[in-house]
Image (cartoon, rainbow, N blue to C red):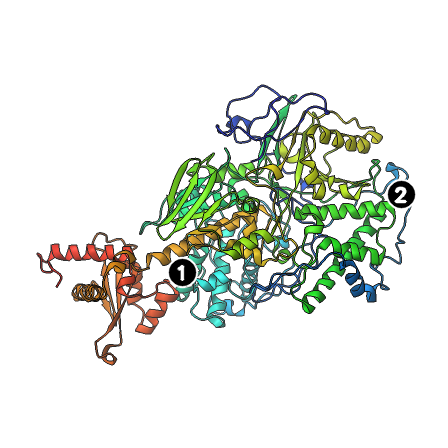
Amino acid sequence: MENEPLENPLDHHSNNASAEEPLPENHLPGSSKLPENHVTDAYSAPEYHLPDPQISSENHLPAPRTSSEDHLPAPQMTSEKHLPTPQISSENRLPAPQITSENHLPTPQIPPEANLTDSLLEKCNKDASEPLSENHAEAPQKHSPVEEDENAPPAKKRRRRKKQFPEMIPSAAAVNGLRVLRPHAKSNVYSEKLMDEIIQMQINDYPSASKSRRRKIADLAKEVDIEALIAISVGFPVDSLTEEEIECNVVSTLGGVEQANYIVVRNHILARWRSNVSVWMTRDHALESIRSEHRGLVNSAYSFLLEHGYINFGLAPAIKEATFRPPEGAEKANVVIVGAGLAGLAAARHLLSLGFKVVVLEGRNRPGGRVRTRKMEGDGVVAAADLGGSVLTGINGNPLGVLARQLGFPLHKVRDICPLYLPDGRAVNSEMDKRVEVSFNRLLDKVCKLRQTMLEDVQSVDVSLGTALEAFRHVYKVAEDPQERMLLDWHLANLEYANASLLSDLSMAFWDQDDPYEMGGDHCFIPGGNGRFIRALAEDLPIFYERNVESIRYGVDGVMVYAGGQVFRGDMVLCTVPLGVLKRGSIEFVPELPQPKKEAIQRLGFGLLNKVAMLFPYDFWGGGIDTFGHLSEDSSMRGEFFLFYSYSSVAGGPLLIALVAGESAIKFETRSPVDAVGRVMDILKRIFTPKGIVVPNPVQVVCTRWGKDRFTYGSYSYVAVGASGDDYDVLAESVGDGKVFFAGEATNRRYPATMHGAFLSGLREAANILRVANRRSLAPLEANAKSLTPLEKTNSVIQNGQELDELFETPDLSFGSFSVLFDPRSVDIDSTSLLRVGFGGEKLESGSLFLYGLISRKQAMELSKVDGDGNRVRVLNRNYGVRLVGRSALGSVGESLISYIKSARISCKGGEIMEDK
């Protein structure tokens, strides 16, 4: 768990720092106020909640390229990490060489590093005569260092790459006969610049009513295209279905007009809800601007989006009310969730909304996991410090952005000005900075071309990104000047920060496999810290704290989870613990996990990032920037305090956080926190004292130790040498025939190492659990069947068939080959009914073959109005998601309904069917 600072911070910087020591295991976070200068938990009494700073216009600048810490517990990847974004293919597959095929390529082999440099040199020597940068002719390799700070050029903006969008499908099909225009949304709150104007419907409020009118076809086409962009920003492919949609049979035939129409309907429902995320969207709302003949597509798309958490999720009052109001129908399974981080909390809320019973087990005495907001205070100042995940990396389509809108949280857009300083405190020459940055990006481009060649030649070869970069650096003689080398080291440290990994451990082939999916839009802080999300998500959930899970046992009868001397039983379990915990083997699985999953756990990397959070009596560094960087003369220490984040505008007080990445993050956990703070203070004084600025001693300091945290053993995942994006998918697979499920950022191939990736994985697994539960509810009752002899089983089948024949002699509704028996206990249109369909008739010597299904009374009435048995079967499958089965596969729900119908018939007919013969 996140360790707490010592209770008695001192006045001088040399002795007031503390490492985060483990909290006592026997109490919840305190709610009583401590003496002044003492730290209280960020989840304590309401009077400690910080006010939301207002967003000033200057805060709405483009986000910085220098990582933005949506990572757990660190920031986003830098733009230098990101190579040019490939276009997303129609099948939503990633082109080589960035990731492997979805079909699990062979695990890359790791060649000996000793001969690697020579082989790389040989491959690239033929290009060595080409200039590395187009600017090299105008920018010689060596420049003299800056003489005086005051004469240095102004700090440059560090750009972040924008998400690219491929060509969209034509909208003609949607315009012609499918869609009708809905009223335009009027801009009220939270205006995005994104694509900003293109996706404004996603982020503005949707009016409650508007005078309907017919607009030009071009306007409708534009609206459909905007809705498509919103769907893309959420993660849907351009003109194809997701794998989940295919599995759910949302259309009867892949490809063609029906699929194209479905995509337009799905995009419209998604965009409609995103325009006002504070309301619960119903099927009727979705139908308002879709022609009635496409009701089936609306039902199919609405059900998919609802069950998979794309709509009607979050923390708005209307959403929360629906979440804790179980849906009507059969009782769902019991689910034990291990871990109350973002993945566990998201899954718990979604499962409750789907009708499941849920219990959450958390080893710490607080929720949130690697998202940790701590209150720091002293000498009359107070601030909320995000010691874990801290930045929303891309607001477009981000589910955490949805939560912020629902809760009314303002957003601070991270500013992209990041001045760099030499070890002696002087500002880096901006021309040299620009030249080295260009060279650094060119090195990454060369590595990209090399890996493409290597993967085409030998698809199972992988080497470390650090080795490849260093080889190309030697070939092209990059950064031979001492200052240029320090600048290059800073960019390399930034890359290690983005991946929470040493470059020597990072896969050259697949380190950026998630790039094509990154969220677009601005990168933002949440004023008051992300702990506000956690408090709201954990509210009213059945969470048992200080329950350290030791063992998960699973079998045909369900699961047993052993935690804190107790045993929790359930039908299924969702494990959301960090990858570091799985790597340590802290949880015993009985039976053992399948070998492919164990191998994936070992192949993927789990890195480390640490922070030094410092609360000062006042903001001496100025409020015009959110980040500034510091260079190191020692390449092995390039990640030590290389980047500073200013949280003054969002934390409620003068808070500065120094980051420690790469090899330095590992060494940091072995050193005294007092020494670490002394080093930080020396850096700050060298930067600001020559400017005539007095650097005061910090009021309080907190140092993180994520690597020693027994609930994480690190910060966030990365693709290590020998691993690939496929390993994220393997980690996400359930085991035990749908008994044990896995969620967390390390199970999300598209959004690993991010807060929103963890959140989305929780929604994903809730949908998977629902699918398995639905499938299981239609499974045959095995217990008695297995104990019967073949003769007894035959007699039982005959007996059951005769029983149903007698009941269906007088159906409540009959049309064509379809007959329906209503639930006698209710006249509600949503009550469950038993459907029987006859097949074969004259063609079968033994008579008709009967199959059965469970549908609502409303669906039965709708089905009776459909012409033709073939069309009715298609409506059953496509629109209602009903599969016809034999009597034995109706499950407990069907058997109970038959019993009630039988009892009611007996009562009505005076015992006419008193015995089955």
* Most foreground residue, 813 or 712: 712
| Residue under the point 50% across and 62% down | 243
* Most foreground residue, 220 or 484: 484
Q: Nearer the viewer, mark 1 or mark 2?
A: 2
Horizontal relation, residue 527 to residue 659: left or right: left
| Residue under the point 21% across and 76% down | 846
Which quarter shows the N terminus? top right
Mark 1 or mark 2, which has the lower sequence index? 2
Label 2 sits on what residue type?
Pro
Label 1 sits on what residue type?
Asn
The answer to whether the residue labelled 1 contacts the one labelled 2, judged by CB atoms less than 8 Å apart, is no
**Crowd around label 1: few <14 · some 14–19 · many ≥20 (10 Å):** many
Give the labeled residue for mark 1: 299
Horizontal relation, residue 753 to residue 135: left or right: left
Q: Secondary structure at mark 2?
A: loop
Position in image of residue 607 (x %, y %): 64, 45
Horizontal relation, residue 683 to residue 271: left or right: right
Question: Is residue 276 visible to us here?
Answer: no
Give the labeled residue for mark 2: 145
Rendered view: 793 above or below 274: below
Residue 700, numbered label: none
Question: Is residue 890 visible to us here?
Answer: yes
| Residue under the point 87% across and 50% down | 480
Position in image of residue 329 (x %, y %): 31, 51
Position in image of residue 864 (x %, y %): 28, 67
